[in-house]
Image: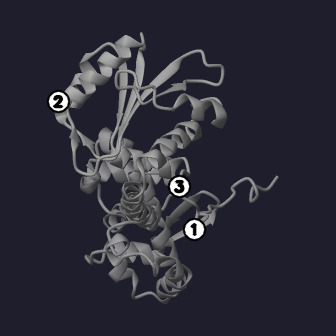
């Protein structure tokens, strides 16, 4: 679905077109009118970047506007609004395709790109080229894509590390993760709760909350290739019956079969299945077994600061 949304370069002609009347317009107005030019659907308009803070359409129109301003095809006479310039009108009616290549004829745009490249070169040099070298993406999307690629590689490393260590370490890892997610009460309580019960396939019992008003029963399997099938989940559900339990979490470093996932959707008990990729993602999200190596702050204009009385 995202692939069907025009890139920020493809948005440039539409931005110029909706500003061709010479009126001042806000980015939100420009986005709505540019979306209408391309016939972008409500479903496409609702798609957000991985951060969830901005839609793809708004982001791409925003960067198209930014580049057009830097090339002086648009001007921003006051905060939050812009309008087309004489240079922009010439470009719109020139018959040429307005994109980065077209904008590169203007010294102002070239200088802007050179400064931008100098600023970002250090942060991007360690990333694989395929994670950032995509001219159809906005800078925000490039950052999101590179971030996702780095996390994917980190997830692979985490799973490999888990497989290289003992089953006992994996048990403790599960405890640490559940604690980091807000379950288990305290490290002491959780540590005691997750000792093997030797009873019907339950690997551990964890408090759902700090008061211990309900319990979560755990099953953890450190497999490399073995797919967890429906019989394993049925056995776990049966073990929950023995304990009169309603909630369980089955964690594996491998994967679950389609039948296993369909089974948990059909039964009354609440059983959550966490496979290897989900396990690694949760560890990254909750900082279990990982540490922050570098931190990049993506900043934006503080509109309140620049508001005059």
In this rendering, the answer to whether 178 lies above or below 125 is above
> Residue placed farthest to the right in the image?
309
1 or 3: mark nearer the eye:
3
In what element is the residue under mark 2? helix
Q: Nearer the viewer, residue 43 or 125?
A: 125
Q: Nearer the viewer, residue 296 or 196?
A: 196
2 or 1: mark nearer the eye:
2
Mark 2 and mark 1 lie on one chain; the one further toward the N terminus is 2
Residue at image location 37% in from the left, 20% down from the top? 270
In this rendering, the answer to whether 178 lies above or below 245 is below
Q: Position of residue 243 (x, y in %)?
A: 42, 13
Quarter of image, res 217: top left
Residue at image location 19% in from the left, 37% down from the top? 257
Crowd tier of the residue under label 3, counting other residues whose Cα lies within 10 Å: few below 14, some 14–19, many 20 or above: some
Q: Position of residue 263 (x, y in %)?
A: 22, 23
- In this figure, which residue is indicated by the disc labeled 3? 289
Give the CA distance from mark 1 to mark 3.
13 Å
Which disc number belongs to residue 259? 2
146 sits left or right of 190 in the view: left
Residue at image location 35% in from the left, 62% down from the top? 11
**Callouts 1 and 3 close, C-beta under 8 Å:** no
**Callouts 2 and 1 close, C-beta under 8 Å:** no
In what element is the residue under mark 1? loop
In what element is the residue under mark 3? loop
122 sits left or right of 263 in the view: right
In this rendering, the answer to whether 2 lies above or below 150 is above
- In this figure, which residue is indicated by the disc labeled 1? 293
130 sits left or right of 288 in the view: left
> Residue placed farthest to the left in the image?
259
Give the CA distance from mark 2 to mark 3.
31 Å
In this rendering, the answer to whether 169 lies above or below 298 is above
- Can residue 71 be spotted in the picture? yes
């Amino acid at each position: 679905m995202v692939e069907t949304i025009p890139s920020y370069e493809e948005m440039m002609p539409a931005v110029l077109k909706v500003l061709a009347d010479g009126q001042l317009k806000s980015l939100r107005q420009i986005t709505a009118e540019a979306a209408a030019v391309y016939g972008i659907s409500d479903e496409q308009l609702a798609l957000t970047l991985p951060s969830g803070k901005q839609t793809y359409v708004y982001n791409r129109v925003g960067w198209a506007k930014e580049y057009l301003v830097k090339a002086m095809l648009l001007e921003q006479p006051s905060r939050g609004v812009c309008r087309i310039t004489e240079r922009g009108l010439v470009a719109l009616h020139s018959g040429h395709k307005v994109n980065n290549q077209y904008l590169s004829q203007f010294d102002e745009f070239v200088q802007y790109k050179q400064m931008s490249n100098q600023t970002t070169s250090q942060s991007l040099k360690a990333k694989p080229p395929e994670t950032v070298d995509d001219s159809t993406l906005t800078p925000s999307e490039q950052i999101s894509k590179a971030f996702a690629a780095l996390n994917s590689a980190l997830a692979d490393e985490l799973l490999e590390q888990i497989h290289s260590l003992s089953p006992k370490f994996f048990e403790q890892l599960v405890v640490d993760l559940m604690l980091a997610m807000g379950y288990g009460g305290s490290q002491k309580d959780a540590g005691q709760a997750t000792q093997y019960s030797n009873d019907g396939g339950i690997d551990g019992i964890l408090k759902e909350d700090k008061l211990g008003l309900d319990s979560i029963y755990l099953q953890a399997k450190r497999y490399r290739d073995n797919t967890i099938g429906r019989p394993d989940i049925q056995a776990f559900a049966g073990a929950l019956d023995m304990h009169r339990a309603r909630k369980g979490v089955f964690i594996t470093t491998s994967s679950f079969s389609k039948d296993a996932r369909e089974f948990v959707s059909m039964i009354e008990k609440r059983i959550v299945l966490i496979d290897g990729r989900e396990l690694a993602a949760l560890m990254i999200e909750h900082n279990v077994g990982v540490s922050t190596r570098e931190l990049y702050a993506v900043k934006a204009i503080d509109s309140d600061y620049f508001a005059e009385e």
